[in-house]
Image (spheres, rainbow, N blue to C red):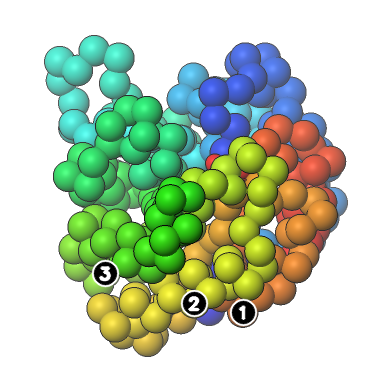
C-alpha cells in the first residue's frame, strides 16, 4: 500500500531561530494526534541538524530541499547527500521547478542528484510539472513524460520504488491558482499509467504521487479525496502551523 504524505517546502524562508520555533510548534500541535499520513518538513540546509534534534522524527520526518550532484571535494558552497543524511534528515526534494528554472538544473544534473541521494539512503521527493504555455497548448502529458523519461525512468526498479513523485504545475506554484481537482487527478493518473508501462502495475500502485501548487487548508480535502492523489507538497501554507496542520488533518 502506498503512503499518504503531506510534505512542507519552506523554501528560503525562516531564520534558524524562526524555523526551530515553527518546527517545535508543529511537533507540539501533532503530539497527541494519530496521523493518517506521513508528515515531512523540507527546511533550509542550515536548519536540518537542529530541527531533527528538536522534534519527534518518528512523527515528522525532515527533508532537505536540494543536494549536490557531486559526492564530495572542492565544490565551494555545496552540500552533499551524505551531509544531508548525517543531519538525521530522511528526504530530499529534487528537481523543483525553481531549481530547474533559476539554477539551471538539467535532467543530467538531476540524474546524478537522484543517484547520490539514493546511494546515501535519502528518499528523493522528485518534482515534475509544466509551465503555463505548455498547458495552454495541451502539451502537459508529453512534457511531464519527457521529464520522467530523462531522469527517474532510467533507474532500476528497486531504486525507483524508493522515490516519491510530486507533480507541481509551475503556473500553480505560489500563485494562488490551484490546478482544478480534475486537472490534478488527470495528471497523477497519467503519471501512474506511465509508471505502470515502464515498471509494472504493482510498482505504479505502490508509488506515492503528490500534488503541489497552491494547495491549502481549503482545497486539500477535495484534492486528497482523488484516487491518484496521495498527498501534497506544500509551500506557502507550510509556514503556518494552523494551515499546515489543517492540510495534514485533511487525510
Ligand atoms: P506553494 O508551493 O504551495 O506555495 O504553491 C509549492 C511548492 O513549490 O512546493
Task: Check contact, mark 2 vs mark 1: CB within 8 A.
Answer: yes
Q: Nearer the viewer, mark 2 or mark 1?
A: 2
* Residue carrying label 3: 158
State the image coordinates of residue 98 (x, y, percent, origin top left).
Answer: 43, 35
The answer to whether the beta carbon of the residue marked 1 is less than 8 Å from any atom of ligand 1 is no
Q: CA distance from mark 1 to mark 3?
A: 24 Å
Q: Secondary structure at mark 3?
A: helix
From the top left corner, tell me how far across and down residue 213 is, in percent: 60, 49
Q: Answer with mark 2 or mark 1, whichever residue precedes in sequence.
A: 2
- Residue 158 sits in quarter: bottom left
The mark that comes first in sequence, 3 or 2, is 3
* Frontmost residue, 244 versus 103: 103
Ligand 1: image quarter: top right
Q: Is residue 42 above or below residue 136?
A: above
Is residue 9 shown above or below 129? above
Can residue 40 be seen by looking at this rendering? no
In the foreground, 4 or 9: 9
Mark 3: few/some/many CA within 10 Å (<14, 14-19, 20+): few
Q: Which residue is mark 1?
A: 227
Q: Quadrant of residue 179?
A: bottom right
Q: Is residue 245 left or right of residue 67?
A: right
Q: Residue at x 61, y 16 (%)?
A: 16
Determine crowd level at label 1: few under 14, some 14-19, many 20+ residues with C-alpha closer than 10 A.
Answer: few
- Residue toward you, 141 or 162: 141
Residue sitting at 71 percent across and 73 percent down?
A: 225
- Crowd class of label 2 (few under 14; some 14 to 19; many from 20; radius 10 Å): some
Which residue bears the numbered disc 2?
A: 189
Farthest residue in the bottom direction? 201
Amino acid at each position: 500500500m502506498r503512503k499518504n504524505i503531506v510534505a512542507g517546502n519552506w523554501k528560503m524562508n525562516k531564520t534558524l531561530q524562526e524555523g526551530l520555533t515553527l518546527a517545535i510548534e508543529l511537533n507540539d500541535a501533532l503530539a497527541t494526534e494519530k496521523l493518517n499520513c506521513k508528515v515531512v518538513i523540507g527546511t533550509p540546509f542550515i536548519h536540518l541538524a537542529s530541527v531533527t534534534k528538536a522534534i519527534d522524527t518518528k512523527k515528522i520526518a525532515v527533508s532537505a530541499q536540494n543536494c549536490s550532484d557531486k559526492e564530495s571535494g572542492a565544490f565551494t558552497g555545496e552540500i552533499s547527500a551524505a551531509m544531508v543524511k548525517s543531519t538525521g534528515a530522511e528526504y530530499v526534494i529534487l528537481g523543483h521547478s525553481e531549481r530547474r528554472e533559476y539554477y539551471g538544473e538539467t535532467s543530467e544534473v538531476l540524474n546524478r542528484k537522484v543517484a547520490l541521494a539514493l546511494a546515501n539512503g535519502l528518499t528523493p521527493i522528485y518534482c515534475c510539472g509544466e509551465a503555463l504555455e505548455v498547458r495552454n497548448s495541451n502539451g502537459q502529458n508529453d512534457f511531464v513524460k519527457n521529464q520522467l523519461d530523462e531522469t527517474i525512468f532510467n533507474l532500476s526498479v528497486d531504486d525507483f520504488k524508493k522515490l516519491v513523485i510530486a507533480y507541481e504545475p509551475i503556473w500553480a506554484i505560489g500563485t494562488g491558482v490551484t490546478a482544478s481537482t480534475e486537472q490534478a487527478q488527470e495528471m497523477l493518473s497519467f503519471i501512474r499509467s506511465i509508471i505502470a508501462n515502464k515498471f509494472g502495475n504493482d510498482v505504479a500502485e505502490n508509488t506515492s504521487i503528490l500534488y503541489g501548487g497552491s494547495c491549502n487548508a481549503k482545497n486539500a480535502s477535495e484534492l486528497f479525496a482523488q484516487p491518484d492523489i496521495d498527498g501534497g507538497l506544500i509551500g506557502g501554507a507550510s509556514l503556518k502551523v494552523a494551515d499546515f496542520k489543517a492540510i495534514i488533518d485533511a487525510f
